[in-house]
Amino acid sequence: MGGNSTEADISIKSGTVVYQNLDKTKYNAYCVMITGTTWEVINNTEKHTIDKSDFSFDFNGFKIKFDCVFNAIHGSPGEDGLLCAYFDLLGIKHTSAPFYQMALTFNKKDCLSVLRDYDIKMATSFVISKGETINTKAIADKVGMPCFVKPNQAGSSFGISKVFKEADLLAALDIAFAEDSTVLIESFLEGTEVSVGVIDYQNEILVLPPTEIVSDNDFFDYDAKYNGKSQEITPARISAIQLENLKAVAKKVYKVLNMKGFSRSEFIFIGDEPYFLELNTVPGLTNESLLPQQSRAAGISLQDLFTNAIEMALKD
């Protein structure tokens, strides 16, 4: 847990919930905090430095090595593939998807480009990189107003703005560029917003009961996600045909991207059709987070959810 992005605090909360809910009769578990070049095992008040050559540490004269890593790092380096590639090189099992899938889905622009070839419905988008000449009229003409301006690679809604008029685009781009050097601008889709977890559960691809998002703010931003400024209704208040369509497209996205482990995708309904927004490969696992809500609605306890993730990783 931890990480090098603005999501580090959320990751620590997620990692703490995971640690608290692990079955201690099955596993000897340790909390590993990663912050920049500092990698440490936190054991009560003690700290032990991780040997990066083999991801081990010394404890009371013994060398402790890990059979499996439960990845609860949101953002870099846990969600963008860097750590997963490192663990793959060392032959250490981990609960996330392969490093390529992690890198692909973390890059919103590239993920949308892949899924577009599989007829997944999505918003109209415009991509701009830092240093490029910004033509606000061209952006507004393509995506319309209002629109969303978001960092291409960031999570927890950091750096996202809803823009209502062309004159406000430059300020929104500055906010997004503070998080990433590439920014994605998307057309506004008006409809019911849902978030749905898809996981590898007992060797089957399982679509969890979706959550309907009703934000008190203009959209499901950081404040709405983590400070109670939204209603999160699980299961979502959608029709049978909407649920059927959602489950089909959510599973299709998971399979097309060759995912493993956890995922949580965001959609907005236009009529009965779900439009894809993005996919998270290390979704929040705090007590307030959506995936734990959905697993409970499916009758899966957090201990069972986390045990399954570890068992699926170990048998892979």
Image (tube, rainbow, N blue to C red):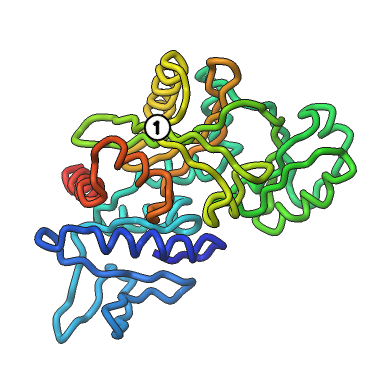
Residue 176 percent coordinates (x, y)? 70, 52
In the rendered image, the quadrant that contains the N terminus is bottom left
172, above or below 35, in the image? above
Residue 312, quarter of the rendered image: top left
Residue with the mark numbered 1: 235
* Left or right of residue 68: residue 152: right
Residue at coordinates 52% horizontally, 55% vertically from top-left? Answer: 226
Residue ranking furthest to the left: 25
Q: Position of residue 142 (x, y in %)?
A: 79, 27
Identify the residue at horizontal 53%, vertical 22% (top origin): 274
The image position of residue 220, as x and y in percent, is 59, 44
The C terminus lies in quadrant: top left
Using the image as rendered, state which of residue 257 and residue 216 is in the foreground.
216
Query: Neighbour class for label 1 at 10 Å: few (<14), some, many (≥20)?
Result: some
Quadrant assignment, res 13: bottom left
Residue at the (39%, 59%) spot, across then down: 14
Where residue 132 appears, x then y in whole percent?
A: 81, 46
Toward the viewer: 55 or 153? Answer: 153
Q: Is residue 230 left or right of residue 82?
A: right
Query: Dot 1 lies on which element?
Result: loop
